[in-house]
Image (spheres, rainbow, N blue to C red):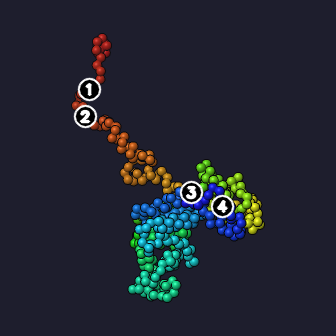
Amino acid sequence: MSNSSPQGFPRELLQQSADARRRYFETKVIAHQRLFQVYEDLLHVIRYPAGTSLILVSGPTGVGKTTLLQRIVKQLVEDAACDPTIPPDHIPVMAMEAPSPDSGNFSWKDYFTRALIAADEPLVADKVAYELGGTPQSEQFPLSRRLTTPDLRRVLEKCLSHRRPRAFIVDEAQHIKKMASGRRLLDQMDTLKSLANMTSTVHVLIGTYELLGLMHLSAQLSRRSVEIHFPRYHAEEPEDLKEFKKLLRTFQRHLPLPEEPDLESHYAFFYEQCLGCTGMLKTLLNKALGAALEQEERTLTSQRWEQHAEPPQKLKDMLQRIKQDEATLKNQNDESHRNTLREMLGLHALPPQDGLLREETSLSSTPPVTSPQSKSRRRVGQRNAKRDLIGRGAESAK
């Protein structure tokens, strides 16, 4: 997934300009445990959708979702390049960023227009639904301003149907939620689901925790969608802390400076600044490296990274919001919901793993126990069964 080497950055970079070294580090993608796991999960669902129309990837801000998008796009392009059976008119993947609406309400007309621009579809004018008022244009992007939202949607539907991309990816997808009411929000998601179904194109929505709950607006959405969580590293988890320190060691090897800095020894500072989110960590290191290169320093020191530290109040507010969203996500998987579900289905509350199978096995292997109510009743005057005394004891008992 990454072309990183144990030796770090190419040493010839030291002979290049500061801008070249800065660009190298800014564009360097470091494969780490969190990114790799989400990448594998998302790629698997895209390759084998099994009826899935919508895939939702959510996580805290700065966790590395945009990097995930870039890696997925690159992999899907490589898959298409290695498949000789793919026709030449195929586009492996399309990706765009959902715009934040200026008026406060999301505009599908603007969305469809940007989607067609992102697709870079040639001969778009030939796909305009002229019967609905479309007219051919001679501009570079031949779509008339007079075209309505249904016109643009039909153009996009034809584009997706003809090019057959493996996925249509939307970054910053939480902007789709900016509508006036809950009913309109359900309409938003139904529009995406319908577009995905009619074009047989999986739509991937990547965004913050604001996306949580979108797939549960209706039973139809829940059935045709998959949710993937992109979590941050948690310092209280020993394995997470170990991976975070490993990530710092990898970053310090790829900082294009004459002397390798020691980031791992300051892991507490870096974790505090990024809250366990690798995207925020990379942003901090980008700023610190830029300052070090500008001053022509041989290595990265604490003076440089502390110079670009975020205010504690800002970080505290961000962490509070993240923890609230994490608690919401965790509550969805609470075992109490499973027990309630089984009660609603008429099943007994069973252990979470193999409870149902274990109960069925025990029922089939345990001999039936006769219930007291199943015994035949005694006739009137018939005494209970008991051992009678014999001999001298019997005579004295009379």
Report the residue marked by disc 1: 383
Question: Do tag 4 and tag 3 residues touch (Cβ < 8 Å)?
Answer: no
- Circle 2 crowding by C-alpha within 10 Å: few under 14, some 14–19, many from 20: few
**Along the polypeptide, which appears first: circle 1 or circle 2?**
2
Marks 2 and 3, how far apart at CA: 66 Å
Per the image, label 3 sits on a secondary structure element best described as helix
Q: Position of residue 193 (x, y in %)?
A: 43, 69
**Along the polypeptide, which appears first: circle 4 or circle 1?**
4
Question: Do tag 1 and tag 2 residues touch (Cβ < 8 Å)?
Answer: no
Question: Do tag 4 and tag 1 residues touch (Cβ < 8 Å)?
Answer: no
**Along the polypeptide, which appears first: circle 2 or circle 3?**
3
Q: Position of residue 235 (x, y in %)?
A: 63, 52
Report the residue marked by disc 4: 9
**Kind of residue indicated by mark 4:** Phe
Report the residue marked by disc 3: 34
Q: Position of residue 19 (x, y in %)?
A: 69, 70
**Along the polypeptide, which appears first: circle 4 or circle 2?**
4
Report the residue marked by disc 2: 376
Per the image, label 1 sits on a secondary structure element best described as loop
Q: Position of residue 294 (x, y in %)?
A: 75, 68
Residue in the foreground of this view, choosing between 258 and 148: 258
- Circle 1 crowding by C-alpha within 10 Å: few under 14, some 14–19, many from 20: few
**Along the polypeptide, which appears first: circle 4 or circle 3?**
4
Marks 4 and 3, how far apart at CA: 22 Å
Marks 1 and 3, how far apart at CA: 75 Å
Q: Residue at x 71, y 66 (%)?
A: 15
Question: Do tag 2 and tag 3 residues touch (Cβ < 8 Å)?
Answer: no
> In the rendered view, would you say 101 is above or below 60?
below
Question: Left or right of 84: which side holds 74?
Answer: right
Per the image, label 4 sits on a secondary structure element best described as loop
